[in-house]
Amino acid sequence: MDEDFVLVGDVIKKILEEKQLFPRTLYGAWEEIVGEETAKYSQPRRLVKNVLYVVVTDPVWKHHLELNKSEILEKLNQFRPEKPIENIRFRIGEIKTDVRRFEKPKGRKKRRSGYRVKRKVSVRKLTTEDKEVLKKISDVELRKICRSLLKRVR
């Protein structure tokens, strides 16, 4: 293979190994924990005091998850041994498909009392090594994404 070309997968793999970017969260591993089909109809929403709250699209899937609750708890706690989850509560609701975690807000909104303020993401300066890796990526959009990810690494 020509040395001028670098596979994107190799670059991303190298960055993830070196920087240990995103520690996997249980939200990101939900599909792996419950399976692809079940993950389409369920979504973890929040974890409060070692209780995981999961939204399910309909009563049939809720019943299915309730029947497999102990197995799911076991898998969750294998994934997250430092703070074991004690219980899972399922409720029927709408699955959010357009989660935009890294998008910047459009403008400043006035804060109303009772609402939480979003924390700012800490940003660091890119090292020369980071810049060299980014130069090797020819796709402009992919380069922007990688630059954004690298700036968020601590």
Image (cartoon, rainbow, N blue to C red):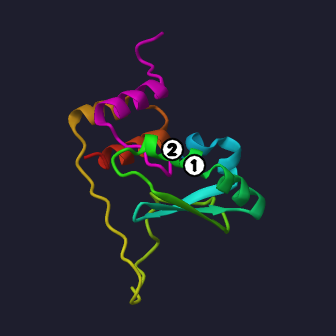
Residue neighbourhood size for the residue with mark 1, other residues' Cα within 10 Å, grouped as few (<14), some (14–19), many (≥20): few
Please give the name of the residue rendered at 52% of the width and 49% of the height, measured from the top-left corner.
Answer: 73
Q: Secondary structure at mark 2?
A: helix
- Rendering coords of residue 104 (x, y %): 43, 64
Q: Secondary structure at mark 1?
A: helix
Residue neighbourhood size for the residue with mark 2, other residues' Cα within 10 Å, grouped as few (<14), some (14–19), many (≥20): some
Q: Amino acid at mark 2?
A: Glu
Q: Amino acid at mark 1?
A: Ser
- Determine if the magenta segment contains residue 111: no
On screen, residue 55 versus residue 22, left or right, reads right
Is residue 100 or residue 94 the one in the foreground? 94
Badge count: 2
Instruction: Find disc 2 in the rendering and name its residue.
Output: 74
Q: CA distance from mark 1 to mark 2?
A: 6 Å
Relative to 116, residue 4 above or below:
above
- Rendering coords of residue 17 (x, y %): 34, 30
Instruction: Find disc 1 in the rendering and name its residue.
Output: 70
Is the Cβ of the residue at disc 1 closer than 8 Å to that at disc 2? yes
Is residue 154 or residue 87 the one in the foreground? 87
For the magenta stretch, what is the residue range? 1-28
- Rendering coords of residue 40 (x, y %): 69, 51
On screen, residue 5 versus residue 40, left or right, reads left
